[in-house]
Image: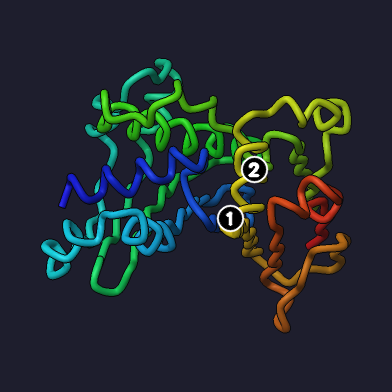
Amino acid sequence: MKKIAISLLTFGCIFLTGCLETTQEITLKEDGSGTISNINDMSALIGLAKQMGGGAEMEKAAGQVIDSTISLTKGADSIPNLTTEEREMARKGTLKFNMDLSKEKFITSLLFPFTSPDQIPAYNRLSGKMMAETMKDQMGDGMPTGGEMPEPSSFDDYYTMEYSNGVLKKKLNKEKYAGVESDQYLKGMKETAGMGLVMKANYIINLPRPAKEVEGKGAKLSDDKMKITISSSIDDFFEDPSLLEFKIKY
C-alpha cells in the first residue's frame, strides 16, 4: 500500500500540485484561539494513475484500506528540512490519512491549534512544507524526471490576515501579487487546470458567535450566521484575486 501511495504522490508531483482540491477550515473561539485544518483531497489522482498504467498494481491492493490518525508529537522529528521553530510547531499537530482504492478515495489532513489568528499564515506554510518534504523523502530517486519540484506555495501566501476585537480581515498583498507570474508552483497548477484537472480551494470559517457583518465578493454566510464559506479555483485566483478577500465582524 505504501508503494501505491507513493505512486499517487508521484502523479501529484508530475502535475506540480499536492492535491486537486483543498479545504482549509478555521474554527475560532471567543478568546481568538482555535484550530486550523488543511485537507488535501487527491482522490482524482487515483483515476488518473489508472489511466496512466497503474491500474494492475492498484487492483491488487484494492481491498486494503488505511484510515489513520497520527499525533505528530514525536513524528515531527522524522520530517526533513524543518527549522527548529517549525518542528516545535509541527509537534502540536495531528495528521489524518484516509485511503480506499476501491472507492477511489485518497485524503490527507493536518490539524493544528493556534492561540491567535495571526499564527494562521505560519501554519499554512508549515502544512505545505510538511507535505512537500514528506513526498520528497518517501520518493527519493523516484522523483519525476526533469528536475526538482518547485518550492510549494499557496493562494494564502499572497494575502495578509488581520484580527482585532471581533474583526477578521483577509486582504490581497498587491505588491507581492504583482510578481505572481514568477511563482512556478502556482503557474504549474494553472497549466494543469488547462489540461482538464480543476484545482479548487475551499475556505471555511466557524465563528464563536453570529456574524454582524460580512464583506467579500466570494463570501457566503450560513443561515445561522456562524459559518462563512469561500470557494475559488486556480483560474479565479489569477483572474480576480479579490474573490478571496473578506472582512468579518462578529
Q: Is residue 176 left or right of residue 116?
A: right
Q: Is residue 51 left or right of residue 7?
A: right
Rendering quarter of residue 199:
bottom right
Q: Is residue 108 left or right of residue 216?
A: left
Amino acid on which the number 1 mark rests in the picture: Ile
Where does label 1 land, which residue?
26
Asked if labels 2 and 1 touch by Cβ distance under 8 angstroms, the answer is: yes
Examine the rendered structure and indicate whether residue 12 appears above or below residue 233: above
* 200 vs 157, nearest the viewer: 200
In whole angstroms, how far apart are the C-alphas of marks 1 and 2?
9 Å
Where does label 2 land, which residue?
117
Mark 1 Cα-neighbour bin, 10 Å: few <14, some 14–19, many ≥20:
many
Mark 2 Cα-neighbour bin, 10 Å: few <14, some 14–19, many ≥20:
many
* 117 vs 9, nearest the viewer: 9
Residue at (54, 58) in percent of width and height:
21
Examine the rendered structure and indicate whether residue 86 appears above or below residue 41: above
Residue at (68, 42) in percent of width and height:
155
Residue at (65, 61) in percent of width and height:
205
Amino acid on which the number 2 mark rests in the picture: Pro
Rendering quarter of residue 28:
bottom right
Where is residue 107 drawn, in percent x and y?
37, 59
